[in-house]
Image: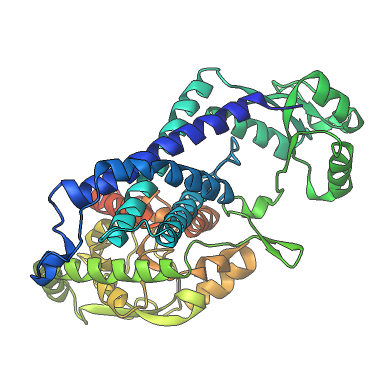
Amino acid sequence: MVNRSSHALRIGFLVTDVAATAAAWVAAYWVRFESGWIPPFYEFYSGPVPPGYVQPTLEQCLGGLPLVIVLALVCYRHARLYEVHRLTRVREETVAVAKGVLLTTLLVAAVTFALRLDQYESRLTFTLFAGLSFPGVLLTRRLCWFALGRLRARGFNQSHALIVGTGRLARRTARSLRKSNWTGIQTVAYVDDDPTGHGQRCDIPLVGPIDSLPQLVEELHIEHVFIALPMNRYADSRRVFDLLSQSIVDVRLVADVPALTSLSLTTTAVHGMTFIGLRESQYHGVNVVVKRLMDVALAAVALVLLAPLLLLVAALVKLTSRGPVFYRQERCSLGGEPFQMLKFRTMRVNAEAGGPQMAAANDPRRTPIGGFLRATNLDELPQLFNVLRGQMSLVGPRPERPVFVRKFQKTIPNYMARHAVKCGMTGWAQVNGWRGNSSLRKRVQYDLYYITHWNPLFDLRILWLTVWHMLFGRQRHAY
């Protein structure tokens, strides 16, 4: 079975890649030599025109275009830009485009220098070429995917899929594919030896047992098979692979890990062995530096802008109750390490003389202004100093006290996974209403989703929602 639509898609991407690369090559020449934005190199040193210097012409630029296109196609193919799939992720394509553009630039430069076709300023031209090619190629490909997704959502360019299994995982897989109509994958039927999970709620038929898969793939023109069986049926999953070993069909295993549904599974190949990561986080490497720089910059700006408000709140705390303005409490952050978290005091002195306890609605221990500070989150502002000291982040799972951490880690699945990152002043769980004395399982679910899907824009979105809720929204469980 040959998928003709995928061939047409590869050809389409090839055409757009060539067009974007050729446009970047000509644009680099224009910016460097014709726009007037960048002076000739000798003007930087106030020197005379070098003997024999001749500015490259547009004809020379166009004459080198065939070589650039040929080398670009070789590099793009090496970067696997034409191994397209309906489930291709943006991140994977971005990395592949960056790799292809870098290889193209280096190879064009090497061939040009080897054939002595280089001119003065050619290094800067190559830099401009790379800087224009990457966004050009990536943008055209994303536009193509967007247009194709809209067409698929309207019923064009469809492919058919079978789901092996009829249980909870199989039904969830069917729902996910139905909602992701941009993929153009239509679930035709379930296939399973055990039909007990196929009830009245299923709107997709059960067409046969697992042994009938090869015939069903041919008869129903199936291009995708999703194995959605529980972990205790590993032998059946293996049998599916064996049965389809002679079929040209895309086979994917849907991981049955209910406790980690919010996590992103990753695979790593090491010396022929495949390792599956169950707790892979985006928060590592250069991302740690980016997040730390964001924390320091935004916290410093916030302290300067909010200084009058901080002084006002401190005065009100002092005037309305006896005791210190600030309250220090031991909490756990990255790796479960304890630190002293700083807050404006909202409870009376010795409020926990009888032992640690969670805050509750209409808590009698609150000071006259404590309820207002907690409802508006103004009591959390001193934690900006914890952020500057590196003990916390602006965004992350809210820190908990060691006594409760020891309790929750025994009763809440994957609770300690929250400590894979620094705790935060606000977080994805908080802006969705899961804070304070609310469902711990929901808080953990949202915290783990944040950890595995972190990016700088996600942090900015959470900060914006936090400010919006403070100013205009009602804080659930804020007491």
Q: Residue furthest front?
A: 52
Q: Establish if 382 lies above or below 254.
A: below
Query: In the image, 296: left or right of 238?
Result: left
Residue 223 on image: x %, y %: 72, 29
Residue 230 screen position, x and y as percent: 78, 45
The mark total stands at 0
Q: Quadrant of residue 157?
A: top right
The structure residue drawn at horizontal position 30% and vertical position 54%, both measured from the top left corner, is: 128
Residue 469 higher or lower than 436, as above or below? above
Q: Is residue 81 left or right of residue 55?
A: right
Position of the N terminus, as image quadrant, is: top right
Residue shown at 49% from the left, 28% from the top:
149
Residue 32 shown left or right of residue 102 in the figure: left
Q: Residue at x 64, y 69 (%)?
A: 410
- x, y percent for residue 198: 78, 27
Q: Vertical placement of 146 versus 395: above or below?
A: above
Q: In which quadrant of the rendered image does the C terminus lie?
A: bottom left
Closer to the camera, 189 or 157?
Answer: 157
Colour setting: rainbow
**Residue 263 visible here:** yes
**Can you name the residue that lies furthest to the right here?**
211
Closer to the camera in the image, 187 or 196? 187
Q: Quadrant of residue 138?
A: top left
Q: Position of residue 431 (x, y in %)?
A: 36, 51
Instruction: Decide if residue 309 is in sight here.
Output: no
- Left or right relative to 173: residue 157: left
425 and 175: which is toward the camera: 175
